[in-house]
Amino acid sequence: MNRQNLRMTSLVEKAIAEEHHLEEIARDGYAPATLPIVLGAIMLALSAIVGAALAITLAFYYFT
């Protein structure tokens, strides 16, 4: 096999391994720690969005 075929084979094997890993996670259920992590990420994202909106609003209010 040439180098290109080996690399493509490697990418395919990685994709298959990742798919199997995701199937195992779905079959076993999610870890109990996943929920607080997801909720924390959502809270951080919402805080960033609200903070940016507030900053833009205040900038327009004070500088126009």
Image (tube, rainbow, N blue to C red):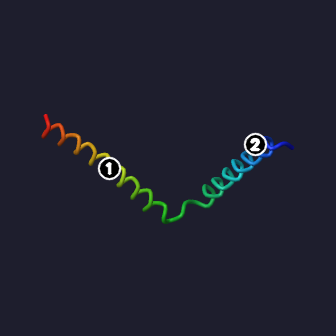
C-alpha gap between disc 2 and disc 1: 40 Å
On the image, numbered disc 1 is attached to which residue?
Answer: 48
Is 47 placed left or right of 4 in the picture?
Answer: left
* Quadrant in which the N terminus is drawn: top right
In the rendering, at what x and y percent does residue 35 appear? 45, 60
Work out whether residue 17 or residue 11 is closer to the camera in this orientation and state it. Answer: 11
Judged from the image, the secondary structure of the residue bearing numbered disc 1 is helix
Q: Residues within 10 Å of mark 2 (few under 14, many from 20)?
A: few
Is 31 placed left or right of 20 in the picture?
Answer: left
- Where 38 falls versus 51 (above or below)? below
* Quadrant in which the C terminus is drawn: top left
Q: Residues within 10 Å of mark 1 (few under 14, many from 20)?
A: few
Residue drawn 39% across the image and 58% down it: 40
**Quarter of the view holding residue 54:** top left
Q: Seen from this angle, which residue lies furthest front?
A: 3
**Quarter of the view holding residue 37:** bottom left
On the image, numbered disc 2 is attached to which residue?
Answer: 8
In the rendering, at what x and y percent does residue 17 appear? 70, 53
Q: Amino acid at mark 1?
A: Ala
Q: Seen from this angle, which residue lies furthest right?
A: 1
**Quarter of the view holding residue 38:** bottom left
